[in-house]
Amino acid sequence: MARLFFTFIISLFLTPFIFTTPSNAAYNVVSFGAKSGGQTDSTQAFLKAWAAACRSTTASTIYVPKGSFLVKAAVFRGPCKSTIKIMIDGTIVAPDYRSMGNSGYWILFIDVDKVAIFGGTLDAKGAAYWACRRSGKSCPIGARSITFNWANNIVVSGLTSINSQLSHLVINSCKNVAVRNVKIIAPDQSPNTDGIHVQGSTGVTITGSTIGTGDDCISIGPGTRNLWMEHIKCGPGHGISIGSLGKDKKEDGVQNVTLTNSVFIGSDNGVRIKSWARPSNSFVTNIVFRNIVMTRVQYPIIVDQNYCPNNQGCPNQSSGVKVSQVTYRNIKGTSRSQAAMIFNCSSSNPCRGIRLQDINLTYMNKAATSTCRNVHGTRSGVVVPRSCV
């Protein structure tokens, strides 16, 4: 179903571009006062172009030409009257981090429907912000580069995001979002620079994308349902993570998530499920990880239900998050640690329905190991390292 939606939504937005060129796009941000060069504040020009497109009763296009455009924190708010396409040939650059305030966002789309973004680069210039954090000085809370809140029927295609202060792309409380062929780049030591974060959303597809950051390539938060990920290249970073979950006692779970035909290169983790060691009604169920190649990954397969940073707020507790029906199929490659498979599940809510099929993970051309605590499941085919499930 997710793949059928993806095909439909891409065709819905792409077809008109066969007949539309940037020169006759309806709303060019330069016409509203945007200045190239990356020094002149073009925020109001972008907002005016958005307002005009949002008022249009027919499908419209916003065009960002080649060049570098400085845009401060901006909110693109709906609902709008018709479909909006944003074609970006240039680069949108962020201001100094101190001028971004404490809103937590840089570019925010809120309460929009049928919006598509094609191409372009977002340069958040996050290095100065990371340095502030490392120095121990008082810093703003930081900004996520592009966020969609309460948005439906969204396409993000061909976008490049570099050096976000925090997460690069956030999909929050959305329905039907297609992310395709994006490139996300940040240094491996940049803090909290998740590539794509999905939470509270249904019907998200992420395909054909390359992500290398200082945190999770893709992080999957509470309330995520029907997520499809395919042809993802992850690394460096912390892998693709469900969680952390269970920080709150009452929290939505995660279900119906598939990752397929993907590669991990040099990441700290491969596929990870992570939950706090504290009471919760959250859950993880109906998850499939298949057709994956791991290259020099620290922990290729890991479930950690004893997450408790600095032993604060959860010492000597057990995770209430119920992990069940998780399939690992055709996962091969190399581990940087001898422990290639770790299932550290909850003592009060053991992992159930774990399925291992055709696994081949080695450590420095030697046998790797698997570790199990409180896990129940099955194995089939050749499973290396020898399964403890």
Image (tube, rainbow, N blue to C red):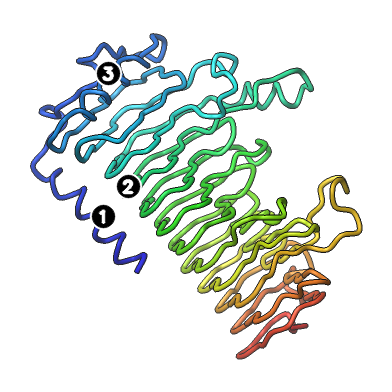
**Comes first in the chain, label 3 or label 1:** 1
Residue 384 visible in the displayed image: yes
Residue 337's x, y, as percent?
A: 77, 63
Q: Which amino acid does label 3 sit on?
A: Lys
Work out how far the residue at label 3 is from the one at label 1, CA to CA, in angstroms.
27 Å
- Quadrant position of residue 40: top left
Mark 2 surroundings within 10 Å by alpha-carbon count, few (fewer than 14), some (14 through 19), many (20 or more) = many
Q: What residue sits 63% from the left and 23% below the top?
A: 129
The location of residue 329, given as percent across then percent down, is 56, 79
Q: What is the secondary structure assignment of the residue under circle 1?
A: helix
In the image, is 260 to the left or to the right of 26? right
Residue 3, percent from left and from top: 34, 66
- Secondary element under disc 2, as helix, strand or loop, is strand
Label 2 is placed on what type of residue? Val
Q: Is residue 93 above or below residue 230?
A: above
| C-beta proximity under 8 Å, tags 2 and 1 | yes
Quarter of the figure with the N terminus:
bottom left
Element under disc 3: helix
Q: Of the numbered discs in the image, which one, if any, rests on residue 9?
A: 1
Which residue is pictured at 45% across the width and 35% down the height?
146
Which residue is pictured at 57% across the width and 59% down the height? 264
Return the residue at label 2.
155
Looking at the image, how many numbered discs can be counted on the residues?
3
Q: Nearer the viewer, mark 2 or mark 3?
A: 3
**Is 356 on the left or on the right of 340, as rendered?**
left
Indicate which disc residue 48 carries. 3
